[in-house]
Amino acid sequence: MRSAGAFAKLVLLWSSAIQLAAAAPLVTPPPRHADWTGGSVDFSRGVALDAVTPEERQVGGVIVSEFKRLHRGLTASTGNGALTVVLALASTQRGMNGLKAAAGAAQYRAVSSEEKYLLETAPGKAIIIAETPRGLLYGGMTLLQLIAKSSTGWSVPGAKLVDYPQLGFRSLHICIFPNTELEGVRQAILLAARFKYNAIIIETWASLKSAKHPETAYENSYSPGQIKPLIQLGKALHMEMIPMLNAWGHASGMRSSSAQHVVLDRFPQFKPLYEEDGWSFCLTNPDIYGHLFDRFGELLELFDHPRYFHLGLDEAWGHRGLMASDRCRGSNPRETLAAHLKKLVGYFKDRNIRVFMWHDMFIQRDHPQLGRLSPANSVPPFDSHLVLDQLPKDVVMAAWNYSSTKEWPVIEYFHDRGFPVVACPWKVRKNAVVMVNTAKRLGIMGLMQTTWDSLDVTLPTVGESGVLAWTPAGFDIDAIPYDGGFLKPIRDLPITALPKLEAVSATARRR
């Protein structure tokens, strides 16, 4: 039996451990290396920004704006009692000098990520050093979570942090349907930035007016000028802004459950562009390329010449053998499809843009391990899975699966064939956990979290997937309280009058 002294010692150690754990603030995603040094850094006269380069000032404008929104009563200020937030790119003299004095400099230098940051707090001062403006912003997003208010004023804990992500590409796919409110899209972009996503894919469906092809959107749909601020917001938050237009299936511009076709319901003269049921583009009709390339060009201009484009290409129902004739598949369906893909990829290669494709039409439906978790897949007469080897290996395969809660072999299938792959879950927590953990185990390109027609319902999963994508392999998502870690950041966003950070950023750049 243990002695009373030993038992008392055990209780003391246990109590100390609880106090130590309680001292660590809840940060999501949790920092990779965190030294909570004890005590707190008090400040009572607001936030003062110390930034020199235009890039540093732009990030500072975002951070200070969010300080004031999230912590009412804080102001941008100077002088004694203000918290001076120092932002320094590591390549500048200020950054180099800051690293020389930083306690975590060795840990920081040992990391190769371009998105890493160092954050340290001291009396009256918080310093963030990073390789890129994006890294500075991530440090700022962490600092915003450290602010605490008490009866005596504002404070941040003493901290020495070095942080970086596990997956390099962490994207959120957002649809704009005819019933989608743009404020909801803005809210989702802001939340994605809060959880340190670095890319947004926007699929506008029949909701964006086209100057060259007005028939492809409803009369009361959004104009490019209405969508542009969302793109600028994402860029102000240092995210890749990626357009999407489906170039095979989903050619109706609407979801299949709506029983609507945005073009053919109103303009039947365009029927030759589509298969018999209107669901997919007619791949043997050369006129589809003038149509698609015009719309691609409009999107590239709207998104200010992005580095990526999502081509869709999923759920091509007619290629399950549902077409009544071979009018749109030709005498050799695989050659027809291969020629279509070559034209699409070539268009973007000429513009130095990489493309994403949904994976499902490149999987054999009857394959015993890989098939049947998608509603389409490859079947005769196209056997579209046999065209996979003709795709360039820089095409990114977006592997989607919204139900499996066991490790899904399709991600590894495309990875083993030399393609960059992004794992694409939706709104089921267990499915998202398995998908992102598989991505980390394999070391694939990253994550594409989807939202589809349930943007608001999916927001907690956006947070969960973002945390998992950032943290190392083996991280237990259940270590983060659901209410405080995932719901609170959603509740922190206002329902209306959402922050226009693109305007703040533009102002910061002009100084």
Image (tube, grey):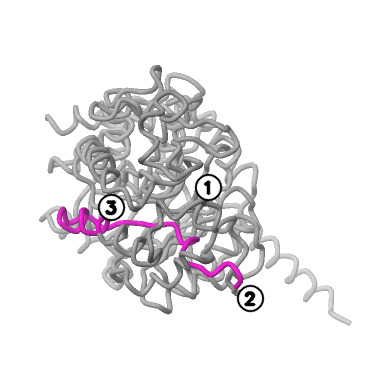
* SS under mark 1: helix
Question: Is residue 350 covered in magenta?
Answer: yes
x%, y% of residue 441?
50, 74
Residue of label 3: 308
Structural crowding at the residue carrying mark 2, measured as other residues with C-alpha within 10 Å and reported as few (<14), some (14–19) or many (≥20): few
Compare residues 186 and 42 and report the one nearer the observer: 186
Residue of label 2: 368
Q: Type of residue at label 3?
A: Tyr
**Marked residue nearer the N-terminal end (1 or 3):** 3
Structural crowding at the residue carrying mark 3, measured as other residues with C-alpha within 10 Å and reported as few (<14), some (14–19) or many (≥20): many
Q: Residue at x 41, y 31 (%)?
A: 206
| Residue 435 shown left or right of residue 415 in the figure | right
Q: Type of residue at label 2?
A: Pro
Quadrant location of residue 104? Answer: bottom left
x%, y% of residue 22?
61, 52
Seen in the picture, residue 476 relative to 509 is either above or below; the reply is below
| Residue 58 shown left or right of residue 484 in the figure | left
Seen in the picture, residue 48 relative to 427 is either above or below; the reply is above
Residue of label 1: 463
* SS under mark 2: loop
CB-based contact (under 8 Å), mark 3 and mark 2: no
Q: Type of residue at label 1?
A: Gly
Q: Residue at x 41, y 28 (%)?
A: 268
Question: Is residue 334 covered in magenta?
Answer: no
Q: What span is in magenta?
A: 343-366
x%, y% of residue 198?
35, 50
